[in-house]
Amino acid sequence: MVPPLVEPVPNEPAAIARLEVEAGSDDSEGEGERGGEDERALLIADYHAGIEVGLRYERGVDVPSRAAERREHLLSILERTEPDRLIVLGDLMHSIGDPGGAERGELEVLFESLPPTLEVTLVKGNHDGDIESWLPDLEVVPGSGVRLGGVGVCHGHTWPAREVLEADVICVGHEHPCVRLEDEVGGSRVERAWLRGPLARGGFAEHASSSYEGVEWLEGEQLPPTLVVCPAFNDLAGGTWINVAGQSFLAPFLPDGLADGDGEAYLLDGTRLGPYETI
C-alpha cells in the first residue's frame, strides 16, 4: 500500500508530508517543483513566537512566556519523527511589524537548538514581516505557496498560487481551526482540530478565468485536490470555531472552497468528528 502524502502525527499539531519528486527532475521542470530525492517533511503552522508579548499589549492579558515549552515541544516532535525538512506554514513569529527583543530572542534560540542538518522552509505568513532579513538559515517562500512534488503548501491568508492548486494535497495554516464540544450537562471545551476535504470548484470561480486558467480540476477534467487545514502549533493563538454558526473563516477561499458536506474535522488524537457543519 502506498503511504499517504500527508499524515498527521498522532496527538500533535503537526503532520508528516511525503514530498515525492521524480528522479532526474530539476527546478526547470515545472514551475515551483524542486529536484532531488523524495523527502519527509514535518509540517507545522502558526508557531507565533512571542505571542505572550502581543497578548499583553494588544489585550491586556498577562501570560508568562511559554517560549521554552514551545521549543521543547517542537524539538521532541522532530526527535520522534526524524524528518529531512521542517516546513512552517506561515506565522513563525507573532508581531506583524519589526519583532521585539523577546520574540527575536525566542526564534534565535529555537534555530540554535534545531538539528544542524535540518533544512527549514517558511511559507511566509501575514505575521512574518521581514523575518528573512534577520533570521539566518531559513528558506522563505511566498505566502501564496509552492508545490513540492504532490504536496502544495501555502499560508492561507491569500489566494494560493496556481502551482499549489495543481498538487494532489494542499496544506494551509492561518485558520487555526477549533471545535467547540459540549457534554450532556451543558459543559463545553474548545479543542484544536484538523479540517480536511476535497476542494470545491465554486470557491475558486472568481479567479478561475485569470489566475487559474487551465487548471484541470477547475475545468472538470479530473478530481479536485484534498485540502488539509492544519491546527495552530501555538495553543494560545485562538482560532476559528468551525462548528459554531456565525463564525467567519479567515481564508478567502473558505468555506466555499470545501465541497458541501465533505469537509471533515478530526481531533489531534485522530478522533473523526465527521462533517464539521454538523458537529
Image (cartoon, grey):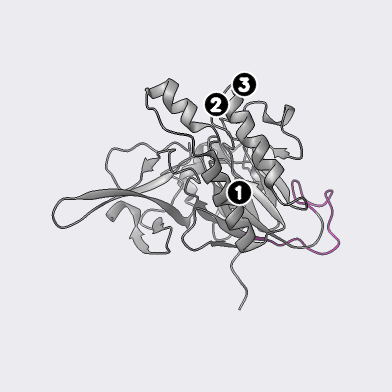
Q: Are marks 3 and 1 in contact (CB under 8 Å)?
A: no
User: Is residue 221 in view from this perspective?
Assistant: no
> Badge 3 local density, few (<14 within 10 Å), some, or many (20+)?
few
Q: Nearer the viewer, mark 3 or mark 1?
A: 3
**Residue 69 seen in the current view:** yes
Instruction: Give me the disc on residue 95.
Output: 2
Circle 1: element type: helix
Q: Position of residue 34 (x, y in %)?
A: 78, 52
Of the residues shown, which amino acid type is indicated by label 2?
Answer: Ser
Name the quadrant containing residue 269: bottom left
Label of residue 165 in the image: 1
Q: Which residue is mark 3?
A: 98
Image: 22 above or below 120: below
The location of residue 3, given as percent across then percent down, is: 61, 71
Distance from Cα at disc 3 to Cα at disc 1:
32 Å
Q: Residue furthest bottom?
A: 1
- Count residues near mark 2 (Cα–Cα under 10 Å), then give few for <14, some for 14-19, many for 20+: many
- Mark 1 and mark 2 lie on one chain; the one further toward the N terminus is 2
Start-end of magenta stretch: 17-34
Q: Is disc 2 in contact with disc 3, using a CB cutoff of under 8 Å?
A: yes
From the top left corner, tell me how far across and down residue 275 is, in percent: 34, 58
Q: Residue at x 37, y 64 (%)?
A: 272
Residue type marked 3: Asp
Sequence-wise first label, 3 or 1: 3
Eyeballing the image, is 161 above or below 44?
above
Q: How many labels were placed on the picture?
A: 3
Foreground residue, 54 or 218?
54
Whole-angstrom CA distance, mark 2 to mark 3, is: 7 Å
Residue 101 drawn in magenta: no
